[in-house]
């Protein structure tokens, strides 16, 4: 076994490697700098220092962005392996922590973060003021291996064997509309009565129409004049009376200025999964937040 390493042969530092990876992912020094919270000149100097230390050019200009050189493309896989190994070390160390005080990052969709989690976090803060929570609000799946979040709320069951997942709720999404909308258009009581009525899309109109059609609703993309990738923005459009919206029952109950319509529509099944990395689940702080959220969300 080779247990010794010549560290003197490593001619660059990790900050330079992080800058390189960020630029390789984004294809832009300015975007990479924003990702890392750096000034663009600082990131540029770090990459220049890495190129100098390695004696190769890693990027070349392409319009307003950058692309990897052949040497840079070959380097990327090795530097990514370093990043993955560093993330694993951090995960294992964090998972051994017996300290409750500290910060836990929690990833959730914008609608969950806005309408459901505040009440739960209020209770958590009351009982455990020593625990701080950083909300990572995103409708994408956070990478728990790379510590984009310690805990994630997801609507799909994780398949990665390195993740611990608990289904905390089996809910449904139903159709809702605001009183002003119903006053103008009437209250549809059957699925057939929905034909031609305007809907609000919580994703692009084509995808939203496909989802609704899959559940037997007569809705085309042309029936979705307003849409947003933000479910909070889309839901606010529904609350303003600008269209019919599909929303999780729990969130709709938290915003009582809407009414459920078309009772014959059975809804869309929406499971809620609480997820963390297996190596983090041993941390007292993370397990405390995980269990508190599981209990509150299951209620």
Image (cartoon, helix red, strand yellow):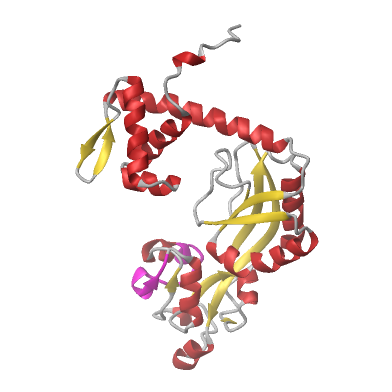
Residue 43 is left or right of residue 66, and the answer is right
Q: Position of residue 119 (x, y in %)?
A: 69, 69
> In the picture, which quadrant includes the C terminus?
bottom right
Whether residue 172 is in magenta: the answer is no
- Which range of residues does the magenta coloring cover? 211-228
Viewer can see residue 244: no
Query: Dividing the picture into quarters, in which one does residue 168 lie?
Result: bottom right
Query: Dividing the picture into quarters, in which one does residue 143 lie?
Result: top right
Task: State the residue in front, 172 or 124.
Answer: 124
Residue visible at 35% across and 75% down in the picture = 225
Is residue 273 positioned above or below 261 on the image? above
Q: Position of residue 43 (x, y in %)?
A: 37, 40
Residue 289 is left or right of residue 246, and the answer is right
Q: Position of residue 54 (x, y in %)?
A: 35, 21
Viewer can see residue 88: yes
Q: Position of residue 243 (x, y in %)?
A: 44, 80
The residue furthest left is 63
Whether residue 214 is in magenta: the answer is yes
Task: State the residue in front, 207 or 295.
Answer: 295
């Amino acid at each position: 076994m080779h247990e010794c390493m010549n560290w003197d042969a490593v001619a660059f530092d990790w900050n330079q490697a992080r800058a390189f990876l960020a630029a390789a992912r984004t294809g832009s020094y300015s975007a990479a700098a924003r990702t890392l919270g750096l000034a663009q000149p600082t990131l540029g100097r770090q990459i220049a220092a890495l190129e100098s230390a390695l004696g190769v050019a890693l990027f070349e200009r392409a319009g307003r962005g950058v692309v990897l050189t052949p040497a840079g493309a070959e380097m990327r896989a090795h530097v990514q392996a370093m990043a993955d190994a560093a993330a694993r070390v951090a995960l294992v160390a964090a998972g051994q922590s017996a300290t409750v005080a500290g910060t836990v990052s929690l990833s959730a969709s914008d609608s969950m973060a806005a309408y459901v989690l505040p009440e739960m976090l209020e209770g958590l803060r009351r009982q455990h003021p020593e625990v701080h929570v950083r909300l990572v609000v995103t409708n994408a799946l956070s990478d728990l291996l790379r510590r984009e979040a310690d805990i994630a709320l997801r609507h799909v069951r994780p398949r990665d064997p390195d993740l611990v997942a608990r289904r905390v709720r089996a809910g449904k999404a139903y159709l809702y509309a605001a009183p002003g909308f119903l006053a103008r258009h009437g209250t549809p009581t059957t699925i057939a009565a929905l034909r031609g009525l305007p809907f609000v899309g919580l994703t692009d109109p084509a995808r939203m129409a496909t989802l609704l059609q899959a559940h037997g609703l007569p809705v085309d993309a042309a029936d979705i004049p307003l849409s947003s990738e933000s479910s909070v923005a889309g839901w606010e459009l529904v609350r303003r009376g600008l269209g019919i919206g599909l929303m999780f029952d729990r969130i709709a109950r938290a915003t009582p200025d809407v009414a459920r319509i078309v009772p014959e529509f059975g809804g869309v099944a929406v499971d809620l999964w609480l997820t963390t990395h297996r190596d983090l689940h041993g941390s007292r702080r993370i397990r405390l937040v995980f269990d508190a959220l599981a209990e509150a969300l299951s209620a």
